[in-house]
Amino acid sequence: MEVARYWRANRQRYQLVGEVCPNCQGKIFPPRDVCPVCEKEAKTPFTFSGHGEVYSYSTVYQAADGYEQATPYTVAMIRLAEGPLISAQLTDVDESDVKIGMPVEMVTRALREDGERGMIVYGYKFRPVMAVA
Amino acid sequence: MMKSSRPVGIVGYGAYVPRYRLPAQEVSDLWTDGNAGLPVREKSVNGLDEDVATMSIEAARNALRRAAVSPEQLGAVWVGSESHPYAVKPTSTIVAEAIGATPYTQAADWQFACKAGTEAFQAAIGFVAGGMAQYAMAIGMDAAQGRPGDALEYTAGAGGAAYILGPAEDAIAEVEGSLSYVTDTPDFWRRQYEKFPEHAGRFTGEPAYFNHVISAARQLMDEMAVSAKDFNHFVCHQPNAKFPLKAGADLGFNPQQMKTGLLVNEIGNTYAGSCMIGLTAILDVAQPGERILVTSFGSGAGSDAFAIRMLRKSETPGVTSTQGYIQRRKVIDYAMYSRLKGHYKLN
Ligand SMILES: [Zn+2]
């Protein structure tokens, strides 16, 4: 596992920090320094609210390396409230309860670990919006 | 008694309890054919993607929302736990980074078995009172391990709370005073490289838990010239359902005073999080003027006691209450529990 590659994207993964385009105000995630809409330079950091909804989803039964313990798990495309569409794992939800359009919120969770001796990678997942009462 | 020269209080707080619950009956059924007495009804269990860092992050975010303090204003981010994800590598920097408090902040991990959170809380009072920081965050959080079949497996839960200490004029509750009582008492320990803790059986009761909890709480009340009847709420460390009620009764508290903060039947023993999350359930409902006595216990051994007075009601829309977390609940069986605890070797 490349420690430096993960470390550089800590804020992006932990807090959903992307960018905002100074020209068209479009919100960008993941950050790429160029606005995908107007193609102008966009380097201003922007922290997303973490709110969004499930755009589509799929349940994984044959896990990729490092994810075997969590099988089955659900991967979704999330439409963030600010616009961008991103892919992420869902958590704290049973597969049968997942619906397209379901409101979700970002949580920071352990994504994977590099064996028992390696580092633990933390980052965003999404779960059904919690009751606030 | 420790009393800060500058008044300090709780500016914000946040709880976290994971979604999964293991009924104690499941443990009893597997290991004793259902014959063992149950020390709690059920306990909370962290998901595969949760540990003390991730649970602390969520509690810390809740505390920041309630405090309406920006993360850059936190002069310290301290995490007390006996289940830090790394043996060497601070949990506190992960939490500080995730909530946006880095890089100009103090960060440290605290250890003292189940009182690691309250000692961070106590130090945070001093940090703020001394003007070293305007605001300091103290977290008590655990994802406790119990050896399969051991008495601790029934109770070792997951969860905890985060607090932001600050000047009393910004606070919802003021810390009136605190006191620590410690002795070298070997009731429970875990040696380096060992996965599960050892405990000294019945020795954990009288000389350890009861002596420290009762001595700390009684001495604080004596020095403040108050008694149990002066408090609306009492919350102490909750290793099982019996111990806190007995300690409270010995101190003169009635069950009504202990009800709101007693969460052990629903979430188990959350170790460094135990009395700290109990206090969040009280802060969720307490009225201005109400007084709360909090007493932790950490094996090894010691207790920190705090007298807290509500200044104003906590009302923050959009933050999940402690009871809200408790009611979000998915019951699991022992097979699922074993998976969440990593008991299965897949390759
Ligand atoms: Zn643009």
Image (spheres, helix red, strand yellow):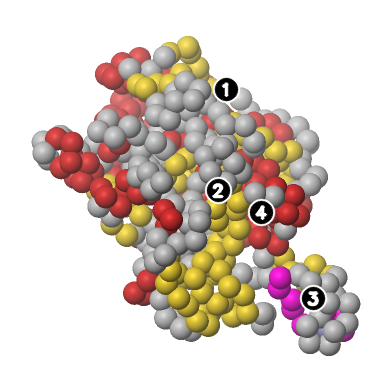
Residue B29 included in the magenta stretch of the image: no
- Nearest the camera: B32 or A2? A2
Q: Position of residue B247 (x, y in %)?
A: 33, 28
Does any atom of ligand 1 lie closer than 8 Å to the CB of label 4? no
Please state which of the two labelled residues, at mark 1 or mark 4, is closer to the viewer.
Answer: 4
Report how far apart the C-alphas of labels 3 and 4 lie in the structure: 20 Å
Query: Looking at the picture, do discs 1 and 3 lie on one chain?
Result: no
Report how far apart the C-alphas of labels 3 and 2 lie in the structure: 31 Å
Secondary structure, mark 4, is helix
Disc 2 is attached to a residue of which chain? A
| Residue B341 visible from this viewpoint | no
Inspect the image, locate mark 3, and give the three-letter code of the amino acid beneath it: Val
Which image quadrant is residue B189 in? top left
The residue at which mark 1 appears reads as B1
Q: Position of residue A71 (x, y in %)?
A: 40, 60
Disc 1 is attached to a residue of which chain? B
Report how far apart the C-alphas of labels 1 and 2 lie in the structure: 45 Å
Query: Looking at the picture, do discs 3 and 2 lie on one chain?
Result: yes
The residue at which mark 3 appears reads as A20
Inspect the image, locate mark 4, and give the three-letter code of the amino acid beneath it: Ala
Inspect the image, locate mark 2, and give the three-letter code of the amino acid beneath it: Glu
Image disc number at residue A113? 2
Q: Give the crowd class for mark 3: few <14, some 14-19, many >=20 residues within 10 Å.
A: many
Residue ID at (54%, 64%): A125
What range of the chain is rendered magenta?
Answer: A20-30
Secondary structure, mark 1, is loop
Query: Looking at the picture, do discs 3 and 4 lie on one chain?
Result: no
